[in-house]
Image (tube, rainbow, N blue to C red):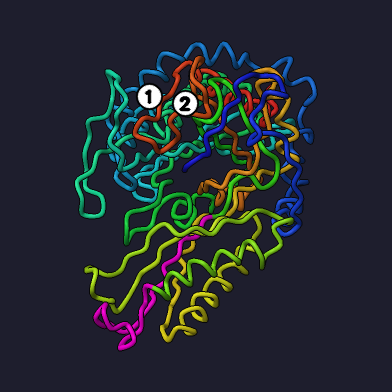
Amino acid sequence: MTLPSVSPSAISKSAIPKAFEFKSFANKAIFSKTLLASALALSFMGAGLNSAQAATNTMPDAAKLAAGVEQKVIDWRRDLHQHPELSNREFRTSKIIEKHLKSLGLEVQTGVAHTGVVAILKGGKLKGGKSGPLIAIRADMDALPVTEVVDLPFASKATDTYRNQKVGVMHACGHDTHVAMLMGVAENLVKVKDSLAGDVMFIFQPAEEGAPDGEEGGAELMLKEGLFAKRKPDQVFGMHVTSSMPSGMIGVRSGPAMASEDSFTIKVKGRQTHGSRPWNGVDPIVAAAQIITNVQTIVSRQVDITKAPAVVSFGAVNGGIRSNIIPDEVELIGTIRTFDQPMRADIKVRLAEMAELSAKTLGASATTEIHPGYPVVVNNPELVASMRPVLASVVGDKMLIEPGLITGAEDFSYYALEAPGMFFFLGVTPKGTDPETAASNHSPAFYVDESALKVGVEAMTKVALTALNAQ
């Protein structure tokens, strides 16, 4: 997952970067399913439990618990960082997770979606002996085909094969920190399991960055294999580190938070001819250029971007081999990002039509193939509202912000379609470094201030304790 680089250079609201200023957003198309589920999402937070309002006064001390596992979390993170593994190949990582979870006495399932690990913590019962709610917490495990340039004693020297090329491998998106923090959260919650009025599912997920070509993976495959089949969580939570905020700052947005992602391939076919005699053939390069230009009007002129932002970008143009040969075919590759499901579907239709008609006017042809990606990440509004005070109690009001819409994509979205979800961000850019210029997630220079990890563990621990209304 890639996030934009922004710079909260000061903590006051007036100094929060424009990209992270509060922005209101209403989208009935996306909200409909979420709002219908919202009553169920929060019904257990007071029903059948004693003094939900007073829970924060009686629940275990999340800060103390986080401090107790801080060094372990750092050690785990450094080990995982030094030994990164690509999507669907997280074999060593899953073994480390499995060993730790079993040492905590948890029910552990391995091999989910190839290398995923899932564990269940059984907490207490509600009054009357009824089973309490189930919450799920997810961390992703995979690294990226990126060669690390950060000078660290635990820097990655790992290599692997990606798309038939030897590449460096690095945790350039911080998934090593996600795994380490959730391992710490699991240890914390096991320590206080008698105070949990419900159960916890810990999800260690492979392939968030996308399965290798020809394979399935990630959240979608975990759900396909029955992750929530026996018992669907009442709520699901996730957290992601970002260089776009200073260390220890937390960002959470209600409603649509991260974009859907669909990629596309357009094949433009012409008729080969000599470059000196273009009239003897059909130039697919000119047709491709026309398609690229015309497609820009889809967002700028054809869809109502007052409802929600949208992005259509071309990332590759492949065609031709010599200066004096007009080729038979040109391939265009790009991405679509939206925050509204009807708009997402509409843009796909318009893209294919625009490509076909633009090519036809020049005597060429164009076929468009859409490769569906992740849905919009939608944070349940009621759940976010209930958890804001919890997050603020960890970092303070000035260190809790509502980010703007993020055009990066995340497959946490699949979980949030199944159960009310909340996905929040943890800043990891150290003091003295401007987040606006810091190396972004996915960069070979991506750097994590490890002091933020304790904040992340405390935040997620406290969210879980609150969600289960710990007594």
Residue 371 visible in the displayed image: yes
Furthest residue toward bottom: 280
Q: Is residue 119 magenta?
A: no
Q: Residue at x 74, y 30 (%)?
A: 127
39 lies left or right of 208:
right
Q: Residue at x 71, y 38 (%)?
A: 383
On the image, numbered disc 2 is attached to which residue?
A: 181
Q: Residue at x 55, y 37 (%)?
A: 238
Q: Amino acid at mark 1?
A: Arg
In front: 67, or 374? 374
In front: 208, or 113? 208
Q: Is residue 275 magenta?
A: yes
Check the image and report above or below for 181 versus 410. Answer: above
On the image, numbered disc 1 is attached to which residue?
A: 77
Q: Quadrant of the C terminus?
A: top right
Point out residue 275 in the picture as x, y percentages from the top left corner. 26, 77
Point out residue 199 in the picture as x, y percentages from the top left corner. 59, 34
Q: Magenta residues, as a range?
A: 261-285
Residue 393 visible in the displayed image: no
Q: Residue at x 60, y 48 (%)?
A: 377
> Quick one: label 1 or label 2, which is nearer the N terminus?
1
Point out residue 119 in the picture as x, y percentages from the top left corner. 46, 37
Is the residue under label 2 in contact with that under label 1 (CB below 8 Å)? yes
Point out residue 263 in the picture as x, y percentages from the top left corner. 46, 61
Q: Amino acid at mark 2?
A: Met
On residue 422, which mark appears? Answer: none
406 lies left or right of 219:
right
